[in-house]
Image (cartoon, rainbow, N blue to C red):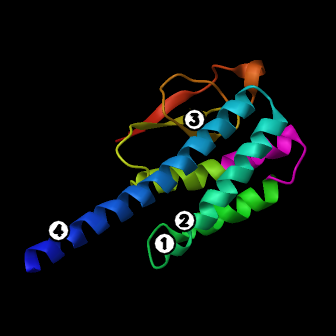
Amino acid sequence: MKTLFLILMSWAGMVTTQAQSKDWNQLLKDYLVLEDALVASNVNDAKDAMGRMQKEVLQLQPEASGKAYQKELKFLAAYLDLYAKSDSLDEIRTGFGKISGSMIALADQKVFGSDTLYVLFCPMKKTSWLDDTKDVKNPYYGKAMLTCGSVKKTIN
């Protein structure tokens, strides 16, 4: 009976971890969609991605209670709330810099699982962003300066 109980508890822990990982991975996926929308200078797609990110953050916040990443989720929620209302591409790009700061901090804490992520840096804006590829596609300037930037860090 004790063995069955331990097996069930282990399985429940795996299911919970998988669900948490799924939520974190969805947040990262939506962030990458936001990045692509800014590369394409598409305000509507950017706003949609931020709206989805807001929902993910709200789902993740209760789990974060007392965790080191709780602060970053609070910052992320505030930035998303502020910039998701904007219709200005420039304002959304400014907000993306702040959103990226929190996403990079979360990636450094390994909340997104085992995927390799890259921190890229825009020398013109003097700010970074997170990507799942080394290819530079600058979300801060889009087509105007598409390949401006470099990889500054790899997060495994």
Q: Nearer the viewer, residue 2 or 23?
A: 2
Give how far apart the Cα atoms at labels 3 and 2 are: 27 Å
Label 4 to label 2, Cα distance in Å?
Answer: 27 Å
Residue 6 lies in quadrant: bottom left
Residue at x-position 85% and y-position 38%: 89
The amino acid pointed to by label 3 is Phe
**Left or right, residue 149 beside residue 5:** right
Of marks 4 and 1, which one's residue comes earlier in the chain? 4
Of tags 4 and 3, the one toward the viewer is 4
Q: Comparing marks 3 and 1, which lies closer to the viewer?
A: 1
**Kind of residue at disc 4:** Ile
Task: Using the image, tell me which numbered label, if any, was put on residue 7.
Answer: 4
Please report whichever mark, 3 or 1, sits nearer to the chain's N-terminal start: 1
| Nearer-N-terminus badge (3/2) | 2
The residue beneath circle 2 is: 60
Q: Residue at x 61, y 61 (%)?
A: 57
Disc 3 to disc 1, C-alpha distance: 31 Å
Graded by Cα atoms within 10 Å as few (under 14), some (14 to 19) or many (20 or more), the crowding at tag 1 reads few
- Tag 3, which secondary structure? strand
Tag 1 residue: 63
Which residue is tagged 3? Answer: 121
Secondary structure mostly taken by the magenta-highlighted segment of the chain: helix
Residue 144 inside the magenta-drawn segment: no
**Pointer 4: residues within 10 angstroms few (<14), some, or many (20+)?**
few
Picture coordinates of residue 116, whole percent (x, y) = 39, 37
Quarter that holds the C terminus: top left
Q: Residue furthest right?
A: 87
- Quadrant in the picture for residue 146: top right
